[in-house]
Amino acid sequence: MQLKTRDKQFIGLGVLLAAISGGLAYAGIIGLKAEMLLGYLPGLAAPAAAVFAWKARSLWGGDVARYLEIIIAGLLIQFVVYDIHLYWHFQEILSGALPVWGMSAVFWRAIFHGLSALSFILIAYGFYLFYTEGER
Amino acid sequence: MALNLERSDVLAIVGGVFLVLILAFLNHRTGIEQISLVGDVTATVAGLGAVYFIYKSQDTIGGDLGRYMLIIGVGIAYYSVTLIPHILSHETQFLTSLIGQTAAIAVYIAQHILVFWSFLLIAYGFYLFWRGGQ
């Protein structure tokens, strides 16, 4: 394993926070509102990843820049979709029904989950190129 | 700010978006909501694919870059593995019926933080990518 100690500590911190928050919820101190608010957070982390990948791309250049751009495209699609999609889902909890927004719940679920799938396909493609062509 | 994307890459990205729009519209016509689970399965398979390629790259790339990709891979792996169980638990409420609402919310809150952390790990990996290239 090439992970450094600080990487494992970073991972461990997340596990600790999750356990503490879960404990607070089990004790009834936080509840549904926290669950929903916390749900939005990944949608903010995705653009952070895209920003760093973008900054990295101009440093590495060449083929690596291309692979990163593909991955960034995937991350940006996640960013665009994630929180809007969650907001849409949460409306069902808050108002009893999934919004149709001019089309249908079926349509929006397909768009959101479909674009999410596309974003991961692009991310996978970027790493596929890293693997097949990144012999350096 | 010229991009290094090849024409086929742009086609894949833009074409992919249009394909999803078309498929979503067709799905809308069927009225069957469960079809979008195909999207979730696809996201899972793609995510695991990314992790597989990262894993295979460890020998050829290795070193610092290998470490950055490994960190990103951990994030993607956790998200991919938990995605469908998490979605199903919300939709079927099986967790709530199994352990009660308070415990279920505790699990959901923990999971939402862990999903946030997986995305943060991906951000951290690319942050190191950037710093490592300086």
Image: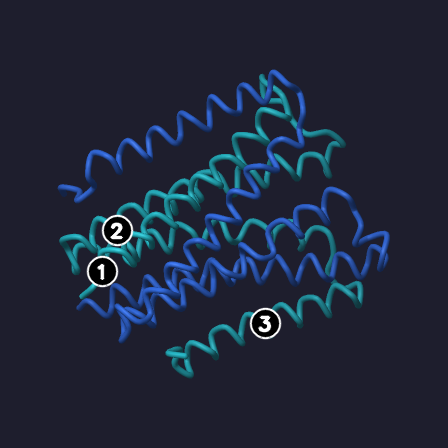
Chain colours: A cyan, B blue
**Image-quadrant location for residue A86:** top right
| Secondary structure at numbered mark 1 | loop
Mark 2 highlights which residue? A67
| Relative to A54, residue A20 above or below | below
Question: Are the residues under marks 2 and 3 on the same chain?
Answer: yes
Q: Please state if B4 lies on the left or on the right of A129 as rendered.
A: left
Query: Element at badge 3?
Result: helix
Query: Going from the N terminus, do you reach mark 3 or mark 1 first?
Result: 3
The residue that appears at 60% across and 16% down in the rendered structure is: B29
- The reply to whether callout 2 and callout 1 are in contact (CB within 8 Å) is yes
Find residue A110 and report its image quarter: top right
**Residue beneath disc 3:** A15
What count of labels does the image hold? 3
Separation (CA) of disc 3 from disc 1: 33 Å
Q: Position of residue B26 (x, y in %)?
A: 55, 19
In the displayed structure image, the side of residue B50 where residue B128 appears, left or right: left
Label 3 or label 1, whichever lies nearer to me, is 1
Quarter location, residue A87 = top right
Image quarter (top left, top right, bottom left or bottom right) of the N terminus of chain A: bottom left
The image's mark for residue A134 is 1
Question: In which chain is the residue bearing label 2?
Answer: A
Q: Nearer the viewer, mark 2 or mark 3?
A: 2
Compared to B51, does A117 lie above or below? Answer: above
The residue at 48%/41% (across/down) is A117
In the rendered image, the vertical position of residue A104 relative to residue B128, given as above or below: above
Front-most of residues B69 and B132: B69
Amino acid identity at mark 2: Tyr
